[in-house]
Image (spheres, grey):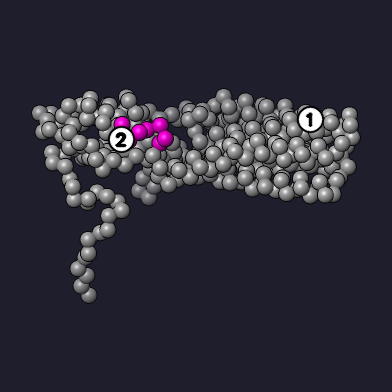
Amino acid sequence: MAHSHNHTASAEQGNSNSKRLLAAFIITAGFMLAEVAGGLLSGSLALLADAGHMLTDAAALLVALLAVRFARRKPNARHTFGYLRLTTLAAFVNALTLLAITGLIFWEAIQRFYQPQPVAGWPMLLIAIAGLLANILAFWLLHHGNEEKNINVRAATLHVLGDLLGSVGAIIAALIILFSGWTPIDPILSIIVSGLILRSAWRLIAESTHELLEGSPAQVDIEALKKDLRRNIPEVRNIHHVHLWLVGEKPLMTLHAQVIPPNDHDALLERIHRYLRDHYQIAHATVQMEYQRCDTGHCEINQTAAAHDHRH
């Protein structure tokens, strides 16, 4: 049995994500206070809803920042994979929080339909424009990081995107109120903005849950991988007992390879590792090579253990 490790993983990428998250946190937390004050002064639900998002986002960004930093800690005897899974857990918590806040906004908006509240248009408009600029800056910082490779940063980016949409909605609501005096637009746009981010939050929950449940990466077809190994490495006769999962979005794999007895065991093993790395981006694989296929089921993790003889 052998191991293949790729430790080219990026401290620089982690530092970049950390700095961007910290800057976005400072911007979001700082402006949240101004938006709360503006929402209270103007009586705008759209502003208060956006401030609620920003409060959640400030906490989400802080959790994301801590998760990125913890994920860079080295493995130890109790956590042999290190703390990479913290980033996925943070993304899951962030998405759940976003769903909860969205539900609260829906509820408050419904109450506003039954009990309309006066809204001051000009303060609402000015605060909403300032909020939009702050959210654009925070979103730019996160979106130009490595969010496409990091579920945790993507979770934080989703929160900021929700704020950005909330600011746009608040601006539209303020303009309509100023020119028509029609205050129901305030809760209406709050509901619309919340609905826009609901789908993305749900998808993020599904994705992070899949990873927490040790699901295999969606982009890897395990059956195709098994066929490719047999087709491209002639000594490989059968691939079985395959397990593929993600830890901190890094794919890990274990497999058994039934092979024709090679002249050079290590060279064949390296070819298998290289194929997995080059064609499937699986840099960390544990491969057990064997000359006869093991059909006993002893490697199935859900197999019932044989009875033991306990003597007292």
- Tell me the amino acid under the disc marked 2: Glu
Indicate left or right for 101 with 11 as reference: right
Local packing at callout 1 (Cα closer than 10 Å; few below 14, some 14-19, many 20+) is: some
Q: Which residues are magenta?
A: 217-224
Query: 54 or 214, which is in the foreground?
Result: 214
Residue at x 89%, y 29% (from the top left corner): 179
Which quarter of the figure has residue 185? top right
Q: Distance from label 1 to label 2 (Cα)?
A: 51 Å
Quadrant of the rendering where the N terminus is positioned: top left
Q: Magenta stretch mostly in which secondary structure? A: loop
Quadrant of the rendering where the C terminus is positioned: bottom left
For disc 2, the marked residue is 223
Local packing at callout 2 (Cα closer than 10 Å; few below 14, some 14-19, many 20+) is: few
Residue at x 71%, y 46% (from the top left corner): 106
Indicate left or right for 255 with 89 as reference: left
- The x and y percentages for residue 218 are 42, 35
Disc 1 element = helix
State yes or no: residue 86 in magenta.
Answer: no
**Mark 2 or mark 1, which is nearer the start of the sequence?**
1
For disc 1, the marked residue is 172
